[in-house]
Amino acid sequence: MTTTTATSTPGLSRDPLEAARNAAKTAASSNVSKASGTGASDATSGTGSSALSSLTSNFNQFLTLLTAQLQHQDPTSPMDNSSFTSELAQFAGVQQQVQSNTNLQQLISLSQDNQVTSGTDLVGRQALASTSILPLQNGSATLRFDASAAEPIAVAVTDATGKVVKTDSFTATAGTNSWHWDGKGDDGSALADGAYNVSVMTGDGASSSTAVPFSVLGTITGVNKTAGGGVGALMGGATIDMNDITSLLSGATAASAADTTA
């Protein structure tokens, strides 16, 4: 069910709920940075196009200068043109590399388009994803985690600004556990659907808290290209990297877990 291994994180509060709050804030900062960053493929493509344009201009200027120098050289003492030939070869080599990079970016873009097209078949399916982005859809959100035995669990949820909006503490049962959130904050107010950030911690207060690996559960509502140049699955207002999706669930599978509702 889970895809990572729980590890003890040095320096965390012994209080698992406090540790969960801090981890959720960190996740919020990381997720916002990823979402607002310039797309890798777009940035590279733009840089490649600019570099090719600049190189073409410089290359033409070089040829003009070379031709003028050859025309005006002293016939009785001709200039050594070996350096010009070497530079000409270097210009041609770099030009080919930049053009190859541009063509590669076009192929990557076409591949992403194909992934988006094929990914539309997933719309309407429930999926588990190994990510700290928690999609709140229709006033409900769910995450899953495995516990080897009954143990105390703390969950913290933040909004996009890193503000903690929901916390919960409970005792997990051995096996697969599901935690459901009704979309209400700690103050009882109903929060808007969208992307939130979540962390899950365990600990008895006697030692450093431990991060619990988990997966979020959501319904795929669309597929698009992400800012980072990848392909994302839309779960309402949240975008989950397609590479983070670990499994697609049937209705029966989605219901088979020990439930905790907050």
Image: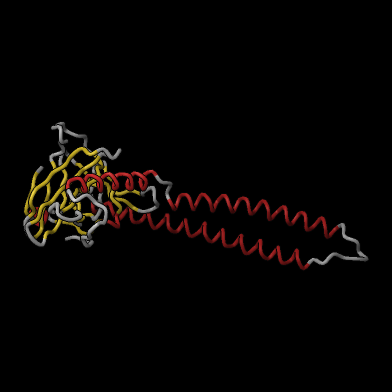
Residue 254 lies, in percent from the top left, at 11, 54
- In the figure, 187 relative to 231: above or below? above
Q: Is residue 26 left or right of residue 45?
A: left
Residue 181 is situated, as x and y percent measured from the top left of the image, at 13, 43
Q: Is residue 201 visible?
A: yes
**How has the structure been colored for display?**
secondary structure
Would you identify the image quadrant in which residue 245 lies?
bottom left
Farthest right residue in view? 76
Q: Residue at x 30, y 49 (%)?
A: 223
The quarter of the image holding the N terminus is bottom left
- Which one is nearer the viewer's eye here, 57 or 176? 176
Q: Is residue 221 visible?
A: no
Quadrant of the drawing holding the C terminus: top left
Q: Residue at x 75, y 65 (%)?
A: 83
- Residue displayed at 16% across by 42% down: 167
Q: Answer with left or right where residue 186 lies relative to residue 26.
A: left
- Write down the quadrant of residue 7 in the picture: bottom left
Q: Of residues 152 and 37, which is closer to you in this image?
A: 152
User: At x 91% / y 64%, what residue is drawn?
Assistant: 75
